[in-house]
Image (cartoon, rainbow, N blue to C red):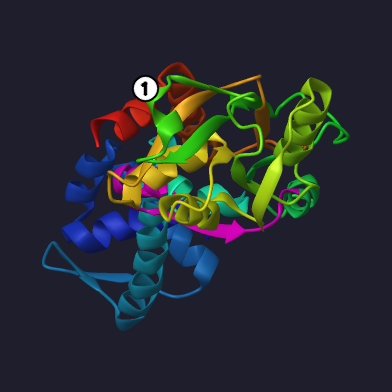
Amino acid sequence: MNLKQMEVFRAVMLSGSISQAAKQLYRTQPAVSMMISSLEDDIGFQLFERHKKRLYPTPEAHYLYKEIESIFSRIQDVNLTVKDIQNKQYGFLRIGCMPGPSSFFLPDILADFLEEHPKVQVSLQTRTSDAIATWVASNQYDLGFAEIPTHQAKNERNKVFDLPCICALPANHPLAKNDVITLKMLHAEPMITLYPDHMISRDLIQHFDQEGYQMNVRLQTRFFTPALKFVERGLGVSIIDPISAVSYTSYAEPGKVMFRRFEPNVVLRIGLLFPSENPSSMITMEFSTLLYNRVTDILNQPEQFLSWGKEA
């Protein structure tokens, strides 16, 4: 039995007559009759009996119709899935994200995306940047959002950003009146930093040493979220990346921390990471474009977090 025979048989069962089935299928009555006869010869039993010009399905026809209807229902499901794929409304997206943005920044973007793509399923896992690079390379993540160290092998598909760091200060700090914070201003000033192995800390240490200023590290944390809590309490200032600043403004109470530009240029290099060989799904590319645009917006419009502190 082939799909054409099933289609004709189903049409006859639904319409109750050869003539109506022929009209629905845009075929001639003899062609439909011949198809039914051929089907009966193939399966070895009778499907219809004719009495007084009416067609009556046999019990066997009803058994067969039940199975064929389930096949056509599945075909209909496949067609709907195809349409969902075409409209980027179907798929599974595996994302690996470094700890900082995984708390607020990326979930906010992902929530916006899922509201527009209600049938898409997502796995969001928080990992170190090194682990994310490894998992993306082995195709365990469709997309990674992570820091990119200088030693990491280049992948032409990756989208890389150098985010200029800024200075977070307690709102009542005397330096908050300045639009730009410099190394000289931070000489011996209590600071909250990441650990020395982080790229931002390494660059800060180098700049302080080169300029001959004292870097007074009062507190060290692994991430900027707790660092900003210490800034709130007036325990020091911190040089942070702008994504952490944007994340902070999404949940914190205004009036406790202000953000200012910082000189010299210290950057956090991050990237959207893709598998180097396997092609990406349309869903992956759709979300990565949204994420790329949000990061670009932070680069192009720093006033969204710089002015947040001033308005408090």
The quadrant the C terminus occupies is: top left
Q: Secondary structure at mark 1?
A: helix
Left or right: 67 in relation to 209: left
With respect to residue 176, does 62 lie above or below?
Answer: below
Residue 119 shown in magenta: yes
- Residue located 54% across and 59% down the image: 123
Report x, y in % for residue 232.
41, 52
- Residue 59 falls in image quadrant: bottom left
Residue drawn at point x = 17 percent, y = 48 percent: 20
**Closest to the observer, 75 or 227:** 227
- Residue 117 magenta: yes
The answer to whether one can see residue 97 in this image is yes
Q: Nearer the viewer, residue 263 or 184?
A: 184
Q: Residue 217 location, x and y as percent?
A: 68, 48
- At 48% from the left and 38% from the top, the residue drawn is 168
Residue at position x 74%, y 51% in the image: 195
Labels in figure, total: 1
Image location of residue 227, percent across then percent down? 54, 53
Disc 1 packing (10 Å; few <14; some 14–19; many ≥20): some
For the view shown, which residue lies furthest in the left direction? 52
The front one of 111 and 191 is 191
Vertical side of 174 occupied by 32: above or below: below
